[in-house]
Image (tube, rainbow, N blue to C red):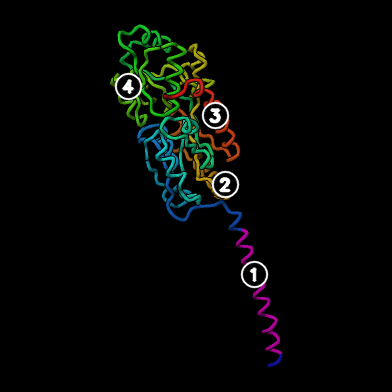
Amino acid sequence: MPQLFKSNRTAVPALLAGAAIFFIANTALAQTAPWQPDRPVSLIVPYAAGGGTDATARAVAKQLGVLWKQPVVVENLPGADGLIGTRRVMEAKPDGYTLLLQVPAIVLTKYTPGLKGIDPLSQLTPVTAVSQSPAAIVASAKLPVKTLSELFQYCQKAPKPCAIGSGETLAKVSAKQIAAEVPLPGLITVNYRGTGAIVTDMIANNVNFAFTGITAALPHHKAGTLRILATQGRQRAAALPDVPTTAEAGYPQFQSVTWFGLFAPKGTPVRIQQGIVAALREAVKDPDVRQTIASSGAEPVVNDPAAFAAQVREDSDRLGALIRRYPLE
């Protein structure tokens, strides 16, 4: 009996020590493993369904859901130049379960009249780019023009002023720039809540042209109901090798590349950010996702939070200078 009692006294500490080692090892493993959600994730698109941002969101949400084994639900919350949906994420818990897909227009929100100088970037964390695509200058196929120069010449001589469709702040600033620098002094800007409605009205020639992402215009360009007259990147878009850049068309000042980027609420832990990036890198390898992104004239570009934050700052400086030159009223 004494020997048995002694054996038990030495066995219990050994078992406790083993349990502690097991706990520590599993805790370390949990801390180093990529973060994954254990309930549905909301991906907020602050623009109407049917536009380029919406198409990109839906292209990746399904595959993220497969990888995470949790639904990733795309929610369209348009209004106030994207601020309504953006604010939903600004005010959400920084836990990875509410994400935002935005475009460069977010950096101009603080300059938008009526929004009281609200700066969404001060309350958001840039996580990663998803894809990027040059923007485009698109015209109704009902106009008698086939080049950018012909469009501008037409609008300068037309019996009534041309109208340009605008879906967000950046497009409004670009419209002011084009009116001043072409010049088209009588140009009318018609504001919309999303790109889908602009495309519909351009097809009908209710508005004559617009700056849009390639995503929304490409199918209609191929169908012949719209004409993409120029793309705004530094080189021709892979999806439109026969369409010149704005620089090639003689208007280098109208360059613009649209990124589609993921943002999280400020304070989102680094581990969660890294988990999102890791999953997205896998998601864009999926053939269907790549095909969807490519067919919209974009390419996947997944970077880390530091690189994306630097990209956002660069665009903030560039576009801030542009809007100071052409302030909104």
- Residue type at mark 1 is Ala
Amino acid under label 3? Asp
Q: Which residues are magenta?
A: 3-28
Q: Position of residue 224 (x, y in %)?
A: 33, 19
Quote the CA–CA distance across marks 4 and 1.
67 Å
Question: Magenta stretch: residue 20 in it?
Answer: yes
Q: Are marks 4 and 1 in contact (CB under 8 Å)?
A: no
| Picture quadrant where residue 217 is located | top left
Look at the numbered disc 3 and give the secondary structure of its residue.
helix
Q: Give the alpha-carbon distance from disc 3 to disc 4, as whole Å.
A: 28 Å
The main secondary structure of the magenta stretch is helix
- First in sequence: mark 2 vs mark 3: 2
Marks 4 and 1, the one that precedes in the sequence: 1
Question: Quick one: SS at disc 4?
Answer: helix
Is 20 on the left or on the right of 126, as rendered?
Answer: right
Residue matched to label 2: 274
Mark 3 or 4, nearer chain start: 4
